[in-house]
Amino acid sequence: MPLPFLTADRGFDTSEDVALPFDDHDQWRRPYRPGPWRVGAAALVLLLASFVLLAAMVTALAGTASGAGLCLALAVLMIVAALRLLRAGAWVSRHGVRRAGFLRTATLPWAQIKDVRTVQQPVRWLGLPRTVQGQALVLVRRGGGQLVLLTDRNADFLARVEAFDRAADAVEAWSAEYAAGS
């Protein structure tokens, strides 16, 4: 029994030659899919947030408004943290490259980037203080200094070497296209 409403086949049955939304190079896009560690951690935080929301509802029905407000605030904080965790990573557009972390975001225009390359170096394992030998995609700035954009040991690429190579190649291709023209 085919279920066409659950597939993406209908989106390609059009006769118009329209660019897909991800083909717009002016929009910020992630050149890879989020990894299972990142998605799993965000799903776990969202699951815990649902229990905290349930506790807020029970507390509100019991008549304690301050306790319900505290639970609601904690749940909102957990949901925002899960969404921020999913947004973390490398983003590219025609305007530059953006490294979104959990707490900070750094954006560099292509004109400030001298080189993008993959190097072997000690990298942080899943963002923790422990370092292991691995690969990192490094941005070299024109004025000096480096920014580690991706590593093969972060939450997106742990045990996914091919995905890291594809993502690094994609960012290097964006760099070759837009940084060279600057």
Image: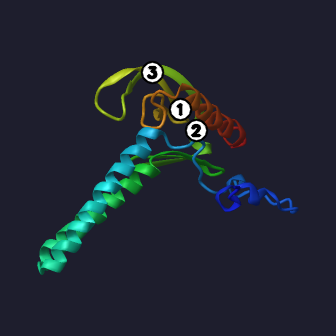
Mark 1: give few (<14), some (14-19) or many (20+) Cα within 10 Å: some
| Quadrant in which residue 50 is drawn | bottom left
Q: Secondary structure at mark 1?
A: strand
Q: Quote the CA–CA distance across marks 3 and 1.
A: 18 Å
Q: Nearer the viewer, mark 3 or mark 2?
A: 3
Tell me whether circle 3 and circle 2 mark residues in contact (CB < 8 Å): no
Task: Judge left or right: residue 122 versus residue 26.
Answer: left
Q: Quote the CA–CA distance across marks 3 and 2.
A: 23 Å
Residue displayed at 47% across by 37% down? 156
Say whether residue 73 is visible.
Answer: no
> What amino acid is found at the position of numbered circle 3 in the picture?
Gly
> What amino acid is found at the position of numbered circle 2 in the picture?
Ile
Task: From this view, report whether residue 69 is shown above or below residue 113.
Answer: below
Q: Nearer the viewer, residue 160 or 13?
A: 13
Q: Which residue is mark 3?
A: 134
| Quadrant in which residue 62 is drawn | bottom left
> What amino acid is found at the position of numbered circle 1 in the picture?
Val
Who comes first in sequence, dot 3 or dot 2? 2
Q: Which residue is mark 2?
A: 113
Residue displayed at 51% across by 31% down? 138
Residue displayed at 37% across by 33% down? 126
Who comes first in sequence, dot 3 or dot 1? 3
Point out residue 9 in the picture as x, y percentages from the top left corner: 74, 55
Task: From this view, report whether residue 167 is shown above or below residue 69.
Answer: above
Q: Quote the CA–CA distance across marks 2 and 1.
A: 6 Å
Disc number placed over residue 140 in the picture, else none = 1
Q: Secondary structure at mark 3?
A: strand
